[in-house]
Structures are given as C-alpha cells and as structure tokens.
Image (spheres, rainbow, N blue to C red):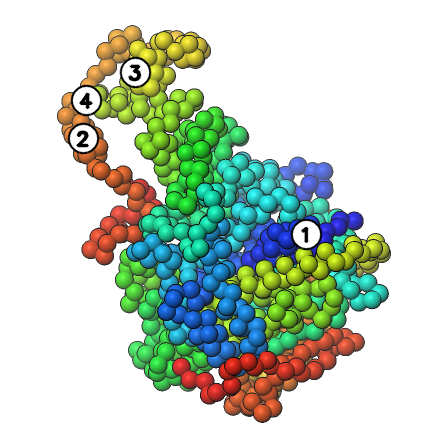
C-alpha cells in the first residue's frame, strides 16, 4: 500500500475555536452504505464535490496539491462539525419548495396508470438522485444567489413535470419560471453535471424544464428568461456571433427591439444597466460602431442550415442515460452514455 | 418529554409505510431514525418487488414459491397474507408515484427472479428500493402531521410495571440531548444485523439495534440462525450485484469455464433460490474450482448491452467504481456474502410482538414469511405489507389506550451509561473498530454458508470474549455534537447481542434447512426440526424454546430446483 496523507478541515462547534486543518492517514465523514447509494458521504476532495466512498485514494493523491489529499466539507451549506454540513437548512428546504410529491387528477384508476414506457425511464434519471448534495455544493449560481432553488431540487421538480401521471405540469412550470430564483437562475456552467455521482445531470433537467415551459406551454416569464433565450438564439441565427449590445434590449422585448422600448418595466431595467454600458464603452469593449452594426460570420449560411435542420425535427430529441428505443438503435446507446442530451 | 400515539423507530420502507398507515388512521405519529430517512438501507434493494398481479399469475403460486423457498420454515398463514396483499400494495405505490418499469402497452412490466415460477418482479431499473423509499419520503414531506425526528439515535425501549411498552429513550445526534419519548405503541422498523458479518452487503448502520433493544426488554427473537448469504457479492468489500442480473440472463461459471449450476439445480439453473446458489458456489470454491481470489464468475455480457444500461445501470457503476470491471464486456468475480437477516423479533401477522404495545416490521421482525431462506424481491414486499399492517393495528391500539405516564428516571439511567462510556480512559481498552472487525471475521468464517459444531463453538467463545472486551471499549470523541464514536460503542453492544443469538440458534438447530447448512447434520429433519427456535433473554444469556410452524395448505416436500 502506498502511503496517503489527507489534509482534513476540522471544526468542533463545542470548542469555541475556529476551523483548522489537520493531517491524517485516514478519516471518515458521515457514511453508511459504502457503495455510492446512500448519499451520506458528500465532501469536497481537492476542491471537487463528490462522494468519499467511491473516491480512489490513488487517483485523489495524483490530483492532490503538495501530495496531501485535501478534504473539506461541502460548499453552499453551513458546517455543523468537521465534514458534516447542514443539509436540512439548505438542500431539503429547497426540495420542499418544489412541491415534491405527485399530484394526479381525481381518484386513481382500479389498476395502474397507463403511461408511455419511455416517460418512466426518462424520469428515472431524476429518481436516481441520492440527495448527496454534491451538485448543491458545486453550484456557482447558488454561491451568488443563495435563494436559487438549485440543481438537486430542480431535477426533483423535473421528475414530476416529466411524469404523465401528474396533473399540474403547467402550474409547476409557471411557478418555477416566475420564481426569480427558479429555472432561469441557472447559468449553464455544467458544474452540477460534472460532480453528480449518479449521472442525474441536474442542469440537463433544468434545461428540459425551460423547454417545457417555453416550447410546450409558451410561458413568458416575468424574469425575462424566455425573452433572453429567444434573443440569444435569434441573434446567433442572424449573425452567428453574439451581439451583446442587442442582447439586452432584445431580451426585454421577447426578442424584439421595438417591443422592448415600449415596456415601462423594461425601460426601467435597461436604464439601470446604463452604468455597465458606459463602463463597456470606456474600456473599449464595445464601440458605438460595433454596437450598431454587428458583423456576421463568413459562413453564416451554415449556421442557418443548422437551425433549419434542428427545427425540422418533429420531436425534440431527449437522450437519457437510461437508454430507450428500438433494438436496431443499438448504436444510439453510445451517444447517450455520457448522460448528456443531444 | 415528547409524546405520540404511535412512535416508529426506523425510517426505511417498513417504518415510513407504518407511519403513513398509522397517520392515515388518525394516529399522532412520530418517526425516529438514526440517519436521514433517504439514507436508510432500503435504498440498497436493487432488483424489485414481487406480486402476482398478472391475470395469468396467482397469489397461491407466489405463496407456494415462498413456502418452498423458505424450506418450509415460513409460517404459511403469514405468507398467504403477504402474497394476497401484494398486488394492492404495488398498485398503491404506483398511484403514489413510483416510476415502475412499463411494458410496451404502458402497463406495469416484470422481470424474472430467483425461486419464482413466474416473472412477477416489478422494478425501477436496479434502484427499486431507492425509488420506493423516495416516493414514501415524498409522502412524509406532504403529510406534515407525521412528526419526523431525523438523526435521532434510540438507545433503549421502556416498559412499565405491567410489562406494557411506554416509549423509548433517544439521543439527538446533532446536540447530544437525551430525550424521553412517551408513546401508546412503538413500532420497531430499524432493519437487520448484517454488520455483525464482515464482509456484508449491508450498510454500516445495519447493526441490529431493534433486535437487541427488543431482546433486552424481554421480547422473544425467532429463527436467528437463518442468515442469508447472497450469491453475487464482490470479493473483499462485499458489495451487492443484484439478482436482477441473473434475472436478465447472466450466467455463473467456475474457473474451468463450466456453467456449474447444471449440477446443482438443473431446472432453475442460476435462478434457483439463494441458499441453493450460494451453497453451489461455495462448494465449487471449496473444491478448488474457483478463481484464486476465492470467487466464481458472473457473466453479464450475455445480456444485450442496451438492456444492461437500461435495467442494470447501478451494476455498471458498481463494477466500474468498485471492481474496475466493465460488466458489459467481461465477467465479474463474485462470491456468496452476508446479505439478509431472516430471523428477528417474533411477531404475529399484525406486527405484534409478545410485549403489549410493541410492534416490529421489516427486516427487524420475524413474522415469519422468509423462514429458512428469503426469496429475492420478497423483502421489499415484507416491509410494505407488514409495515402497513403494523401501522394500522397500532393506530387502532392507540385509539383504545391512554397515553402512559413515564418517569424521567429512565433518561437518567441512559445518561449515566453514556457518561460511563465517555469517561473511560482512552488507551485502556480496545477500540470499537477493532472489536467490530474481529466479530465480523469470526462470524464470516464460522457462521456462514457451511457450519459445524466446532466452528460454531469457536465463534461462540469469541463472541463471549468480545462482549467482555466491549464493556471496556474506549472512544476518542468526548463531545456531544455528532459523536459518532459514542454511537459506535452503543451499536457494538447491540451487535454482540445479535451475534450471540445467531450462534446459539445455529448450534441449537441440528439439521440443515434453508440458510442453515450443518456439515455435521447435512439432512433436513422434519420430524425433529420443523419448528422455530425462539430465544428470550434469561439473566444475561438467551434461553431456547420452540414454537410451531404454521402449515395451511402446503405439506413439506423435498426441495428441488
């Protein structure tokens, strides 16, 4: 056995002393199953949120700064003692926020609900969450906005939104879209996908919530989430490059520059952004010329063809780690293995 | 003092189901758990849950398979109830939101499982236990009238002068506060004792707390010798590879490439009952046809790759993370490993123990529906059916009884005990982990798939010595906040009581039946041993008595697969 040393962040609330670092041979956080299924042992190892039980010492030692494996409690949650954080105060409150139980319409049938087999496999990806808190710990948006509902709870929300037995799909989506700390508070950073030990891919579930909200229910939220996405994708279709000067005003007008100007709320918020614009002009990041006349990519036609191709599909392609499909689609499996959507 | 009509100890499937059933019937319910409910070991149930729900299937067929699987030690009245009520339980779970696998028609779909004459196992990929546990927890979050005490460790049960249960003493793990809980009835639902073995598929929390606490206040235990070894666990760390793998078509091979189950169970092959497959593997290994690491091979590559990813996803992860094997491409080495406690606190079909007001359900209990050997996918069913029945019966009991008066002196007693442990000089005694390790190894060596008198006597002596040593076990953490060290010392006491009972019962049963295979008594002996072994605390040792096995419609026959 090679020797490993672990540098562990210790904290004893009874000592009256602040947290300190201690070097050890071996130590444990809360743990139970030792098989990556109970979710008790979430910690940060060399800065990365993960389960301690399925972390190989040898691999962790390779990434360790100065040879010592650094073990800290998870982030975004208050530390109770040593490596134990208060998940009730953060994670479980957020889970409770998304109305985490099935709400079917009326009395249940005599037998089972008859549903599309793929829909069950689809939401099983969210069901695979073991509530270890790794994604909450790694979430950059939550660091900025502690009230953000966050990756785990929103993945849980998708589990009901995607469930054909639930009768409140639209209400759930409206609620999560209108909440300023809801689905549009995610910044697409992929951190949750990277750290999730069960391939739940929380960010993907958040993106699915957004698509359901916009494409399926046409929800135009008060947070301008919908407008912002529309402006983003319209600008790329038009120029191939993002026009930051147009992005903001277009976002406020559901993608239209003119409509943005006549909205009093938009005007107010745009005015509030003026200092940012001025800073941009001063630093030379934006010039009046580039702001007004945005250049197009040379092969912009290619971008347009991509848009056309994607939009011509009748169904949205929703790949999932619990692979479904015809037996002749065997090769599709390899695409979906990463737990990413196409 | 905290008070509830019904107090449930343990928040896995049995406990949550009991709490919901009792609350539905109007009882004020408290549920205590030493871990957050979603960390409970029910999580680990991978393969599924049995029910004769298909019109072509019948509860009688399910019951017969279960009786035969139990090697005729299961009580047939209880088995009939479980199998009759199974379909309604599955449908109730489905209506609550469990994402059961569907067939092409969108109806509930099944997979094959060991010891069963029909494919009647309903499942959610290979996370069935987790999926059901989370759905029940959703219901607990919804029904705020069930009061949850999460991360509370129960140290003892309390009886009054008339022998009725009146509550328990528990420690808030977060701040070390000891509290008295008064209750009209208490439902034990705190799982099995797998941790007395090493290796085991069981989580570190499965230390037999409920079995020991009930035993200590005089409740009889039953069938404690019946300890299930699961046929497919990883060598070394004991991690579980679901029976679903064989249900999906995986085969077993010895080191010579022979599909050896042909010799032991020519009809059911890999899907014979677990005791049969585990014995077959151990025979191959003992007779030198295993691999050098003391294993045989499970070949899952027979299952189509896409199906593996869809239905055995967790096993892909376990293989990759804990064995370094891609199960879609190569066989994985496995061996029999400790998995399930068939014995436990003796109950009737409503979960009642011999102590008025005390109930038990799930792995902590022995109804007995599993007898000498539990069939795969019957454990989730056991937790749900008897969890619900216990909850309902307890709510009824609570309606007819007044809240008991309990003196706070019991808390003082428990606190004194804890101060004594904390006050011991570190360095004078052995540490918890050392005793635990030795206990686990000796149990796995002598009280496993094959047993004999010599080995059992050795194990018995070791357990007695460890009990002595445990009285002086020392801990480093002297604090009150999350003192896991202290809880470990208390759990160690529970574990040793469990181990002692397992060894005593295994010595007592001089025949081979189900999971108990005595090489010195290799035959089943219905004339002398078609009976349960009951153990009750007498002084500081278990006293043995016997009770009848209930037979209804199935006479014992020779067992062949």
Q: Which one is closest to the eye, mark 3 or mark 4?
A: 3
Task: Answer whether residue B34 is visible to the viewer in this image.
Answer: no
Mark 3 / mark 2, whichever is N-terminal: 3
Residue, disc 3:
A256
**In-front residue for pair B303/B74:** B74
Q: What residue sits right under mark 1 in the picture?
A: B27
Q: Are marks 3 and 4 on the same chain?
A: yes
| Residue at mark 2: chain | A
Cβ atoms under marks 2 and 1 closer than 8 Å: no
Q: How many marks?
A: 4
Q: Residue at x 38, y 27 (%)?
A: A219
x, y percent for residue B134: 51, 50
Residue B386, can we see it?
yes
Nearer to us of marks 1 and 3 is: 1
A200 horizontally vs B527: left or right? left
Horizontal side, residue A72 vs residue B214: left or right: left
Among the 4 quarters of the image, the one containing residue B334: bottom left
Distance from Cα at disc 4 to Cα at disc 1:
69 Å
The residue singled out by tag 2 in the image is A308
Residue corresponding to mark 4: A297
First in sequence: mark 3 or mark 4?
3
Secondary element at image label 2: helix
């Amino acid at each position: 056995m090679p020797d490993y040393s672990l540098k562990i962040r210790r904290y004893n609330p009874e000592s009256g002393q602040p947290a300190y670092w201690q070097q050890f041979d071996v130590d444990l956080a809360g743990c139970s199953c030792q098989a990556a299924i109970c979710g008790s042992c979430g910690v940060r190892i060399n800065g990365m949120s993960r389960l301690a039980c399925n972390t190989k010492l040898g691999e962790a030692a390779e990434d360790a700064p100065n040879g010592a494996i650094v073990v800290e409690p998870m982030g975004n949650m208050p530390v109770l003692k040593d490596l134990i954080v208060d998940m009730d105060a953060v994670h479980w409150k957020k889970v409770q926020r998304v109305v985490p139980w099935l709400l079917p319409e009326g009395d249940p049938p005599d037998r089972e609900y008859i549903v599309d087999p793929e829909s069950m496999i689809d939401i099983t990806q969210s069901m695979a969450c073991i509530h270890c808190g790794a994604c909450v710990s790694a979430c950059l948006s939550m660091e900025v906005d502690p009230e953000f509902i966050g990756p785990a709870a929103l993945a849980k929300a998708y589990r009901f939104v995607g469930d054909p037995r639930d009768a409140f799909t639209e209400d759930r989506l409206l609620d999560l879209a209108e909440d300023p700390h809801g689905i549009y508070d995610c910044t697409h950073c992929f951190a949750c996908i990277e750290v999730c030990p069960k391939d739940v891919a929380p960010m993907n579930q958040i993106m699915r919530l957004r698509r359901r909200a916009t494409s399926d229910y046409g929800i135009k939220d008060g947070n301008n989430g919908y407008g912002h996405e529309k402006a983003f994708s319209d600008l790329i279709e038009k120029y191939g490059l993002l026009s930051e000067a147009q992005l903001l005003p277009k976002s406020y007008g559901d993608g239209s520059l003119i409509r943005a100007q006549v909205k009093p709320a938009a005007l107010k918020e745009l005015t509030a952004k003026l200092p940012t614009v001025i800073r941009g002009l001063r630093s030379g990041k934006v010039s009046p010329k580039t702001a007004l006349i945005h250049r197009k990519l040379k092969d912009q036609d290619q971008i347009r063809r991509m848009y056309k191709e994607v939009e011509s599909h009748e169904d949205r392609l929703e790949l999932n780690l619990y692979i479904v499909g015809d037996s002749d689609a065997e090769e599709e499996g390899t695409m979906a293995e990463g737990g990413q959507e196409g | 003092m905290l008070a509830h009509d019904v107090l449930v100890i343990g928040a896995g499937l049995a406990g949550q189901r009991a709490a919901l059933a009792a609350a539905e019937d109007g009882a004020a319910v408290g549920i205590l758990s030493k871990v957050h409910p979603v960390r409970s070991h029910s999580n680990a149930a991978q393969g599924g849950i049995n029910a004769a729900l298909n019109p072509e299937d019948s509860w009688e067929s399910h019951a017969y398979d279960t009786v035969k699987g139990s090697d005729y030690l299961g009580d047939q009245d209880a088995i009939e109830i479980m199998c009759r009520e199974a379909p309604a339980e599955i449908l109730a779970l489905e209506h609550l939101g469990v994402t059961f696998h569907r067939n092409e028609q969108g109806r509930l779909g099944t997979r094959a499982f060991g010891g069963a004459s029909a494919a009647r196992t309903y499942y959610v990929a290979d996370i069935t236990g987790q999926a059901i546990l989370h759905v029940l927890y959703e219901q607990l979050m919804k029904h705020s009238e069930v009061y949850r005490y999460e991360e509370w460790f129960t140290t003892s049960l309390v009886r009054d002068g008339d022998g009725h249960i009146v509550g328990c003493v528990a420690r808030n793990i977060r701040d070390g506060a000891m509290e008295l809980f008064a209750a009209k009835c208490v439902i034990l639902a705190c799982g099995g004792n797998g941790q007395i073995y090493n290796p085991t598929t069981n989580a570190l929390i499965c230390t037999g707390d409920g079995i020991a606490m009930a035993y200590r206040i005089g409740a009889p235990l039953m069938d404690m010798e019946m300890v299930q070894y699961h046929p497919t666990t990883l060598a070394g760390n004991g991690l579980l590879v679901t029976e679903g793998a064989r249900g999906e078509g995986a085969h077993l091979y010895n080191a010579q490439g022979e599909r050896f189950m042909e010799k032991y169970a020519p009809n059911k092959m890999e899907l014979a009952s677990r005791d049969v497959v585990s014995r077959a593997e151990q025979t191959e290994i003992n007779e030198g046809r295993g691999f050098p690491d003391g294993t045989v091979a499970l070949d899952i590559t027979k299952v189509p790759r896409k199906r593996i990813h869809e239905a055995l996803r967790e096993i892909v992860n376990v293989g990759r993370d804990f064995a370094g094997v891609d199960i879609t491409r190569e066989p994985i080495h496995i061996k029999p490993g400790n998995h399930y406690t068939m014995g436990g606190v003796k109950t009737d079909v409503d979960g009642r123990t011999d102590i008025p007001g005390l109930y038990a359900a799930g792995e902590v209990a022995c109804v007995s529906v599993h007898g000498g050997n539990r069939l795969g996918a019957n454990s989730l069913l056991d937790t749900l059916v008897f969890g619900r029945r216990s909850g309902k019966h307890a709510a009824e009991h609570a309606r007819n009884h007044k809240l008991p008066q309990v003196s706070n002196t019991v808390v003082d007693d428990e606190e004194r005990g804890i101060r004594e442990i904390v006050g011991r000089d570190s360095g004078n005694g052995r540490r918890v982990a050392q005793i635990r390790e030795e206990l686990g190894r000796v149990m796995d060596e002598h009280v496993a798939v094959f047993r004999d008198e010599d080995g059992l006597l050795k194990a018995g002596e070791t357990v007695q010595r460890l009990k002595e040593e445990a009285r002086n076990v020392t801990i480093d953490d002297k604090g009150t906040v999350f003192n896991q060290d202290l809880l470990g010392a208390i759990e160690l006491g529970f574990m040793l009581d469990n181990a002692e009972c397992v060894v005593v019962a295994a010595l007592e049963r001089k025949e081979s039946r189900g999971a108990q295979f005595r090489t010195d008594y290799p035959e089943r002996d219905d004339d002398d041993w078609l009976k349960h072994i009951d153990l009750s605390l007498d002084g500081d040792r278990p006293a043995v008595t016997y009770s009848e096995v209930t037979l209804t419609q199935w006479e014992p026959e020779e067992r062949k697969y």
